[in-house]
Image (cartoon, rainbow, N blue to C red):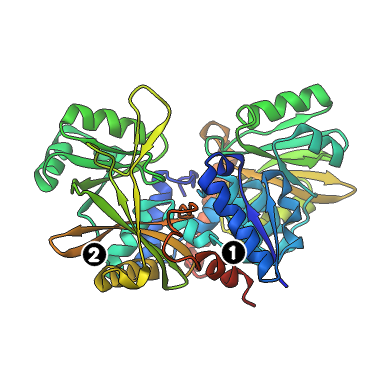
Amino acid sequence: MNNDYRYMKTGYFVSLHAEILGDDVVPTTENAVDVYRPPILLTRAAKNGTPTMPFILTDSVKQIMAVFTFPVVVFPVNPFMFNGFKVAENRTALYMAVKSLSMNYRYAVCAQPLKGKLLSVKSFFGECVSEYGEVKAVAKKVYETFNIPVCKLHVQRLNGKAYLCGLQLVEFGEIQPSDVDLLSKMVSRFSGKGWSG
Amino acid sequence: MTRIACFVEKYNFFHSREAEALQMFKETAQKLGHEFHFIFRNELSEIPKYDAVFIRAITDPLYTAYVVSKTAWELGLRVIDDPISIRICANKIHQYRLFEKYGVPYIPTIFLGKEEFHHKQIAEIFEVLGKPVVIKAPYTSFSKYVEKASCETSFREVAKRFFRRSDYIVVQKFMPSRFDWRVGVLNGEVLYVCKYMMPKGKWKHGVKRRGKPSFVWGRTVTLKRDNAPKRLKEVALKACSVVGNGLYGVDVKEVNGDYIVVEVNDNPSIYRGQEDLRDKDIYEKIIKFLAEP
């Protein structure tokens, strides 16, 4: 529950050690690696029935412009960035976004069209505070698929439907008192049900 | 007919012997009646059009190669290297813990966490493993991020650098040798056997030139797989059995007539005229493995 499931960080090694010893671990190291790689997150989520937008993995701005119309949302896919994304409204902004998120074109980025309104919600065991039922449904489905206890989901809403765009860390400073209440409620429910629940 | 995609990055073509080996894979696949195309990082969306994916770019769960491998795996394609192997081989701590669990003989190893990085612990490591020690970052590949330290100052300097990307590092006993055995394994069978010689005056196969970005590599001496020591092959196969049944390169050290595993690597280097020198059928075997239903 340390919120930091990044690859090669302490939480990852603890989970790994427990997995090798044969214990049940939530989240599994496989899921912890996969959710921070946007193309894998979207592929697996879509396979499990979560609505997603089409995406491309590339380091070429021209390719993004050939496939999608503006605005475009760009996520990093490199070993150093686990947080942040950029929305590009035009060609110049897209060049700047790709240059910075691909670390000067060394790595690839994941680009998706931004057709609706982009929302970021904090998910605690699949529960989130949102006025939209469809966003809550996405959070629940993502939790069912990946079992990530604490995370931030980036979702876009279009015509009453929510599409998953990305999943990232919740920064410590972002957690509000109301989030703590929701989190403790979910933890008590979770521990009451036991690990298999 | 199987459509095979070979995922490569630009650097795979920099070395002429590697580029020739990739060409050999293509020619062999075509000779066997399969399609073989190179795909680059911008062509991820093409993966569903293929039946199998062969990854030749550097694999690490944080690199594009893992995204390619996992996407292909999720789509039900045959993949070398599969995502599970990548996760185990790209994280040496994961690998050594599995060796420990399943009784694979490996080099005496201690894991050091960021929290335990202090004078007392370092002194204890030197006491247990002797001086010098070899410090490895868990994400090591192609002899990179493996350094030797014989005093606390250099230990601290190296460890500090490796702790930037990982909260744990690997410290191993220094076992000098003229060469390391390299056993190529595919699907639980030995594919090729080589000796990776150390360059003159050096202690590992690939060493960075001082003050230059380039590497100097030792010679590769290839043996016929049937002529290689039986015990060596047994140890290599046992090490691979805990990782998976894909394509691996096992590094083994010969110590007092016995064999101990240094590490198992996924995406092992295959260069024309080196690994394939004695056993010419390695391309065919790999292609057939990818093409199997």
Task: Tell me the distance, in whole angstroms, between the alpha carbons under discs 2 and 1.
Answer: 28 Å
Q: Chain of mark 1?
A: B
- The residue that mark 1 highlights is B79
Q: Chain of mark 2?
A: B
Please provide percent x and percent y for residue B10.
61, 40
Look at label 2 and name its amino acid. Pro
**For the residue labelled by badge 1, is the local secondary structure a helix, a strand or a loop?**
strand
Q: Residues within 10 Å of mark 1 (few under 14, many from 20)?
A: many
Q: Nearer the viewer, residue A80 or A144?
A: A80
**Quadrant in the picture for residue B36:** bottom right
Q: Residues within 10 Å of mark 2 (few under 14, many from 20)?
A: some
Q: Earlier in the sequence, mark 2 or mark 1?
A: 1
- The residue that mark 2 highlights is B105
Q: Please give the name of the residue rendered at 23% of the width and 52% of the height, measured from the top-left corner.
A: B109
In the displayed structure, would residue A15 be above or below residue A80? below
Please provide percent x and percent y for residue B279.
44, 66
Q: Number of marks in the image?
A: 2
Look at label 1 and name its amino acid. Val
Q: Is residue B174 visible?
A: yes
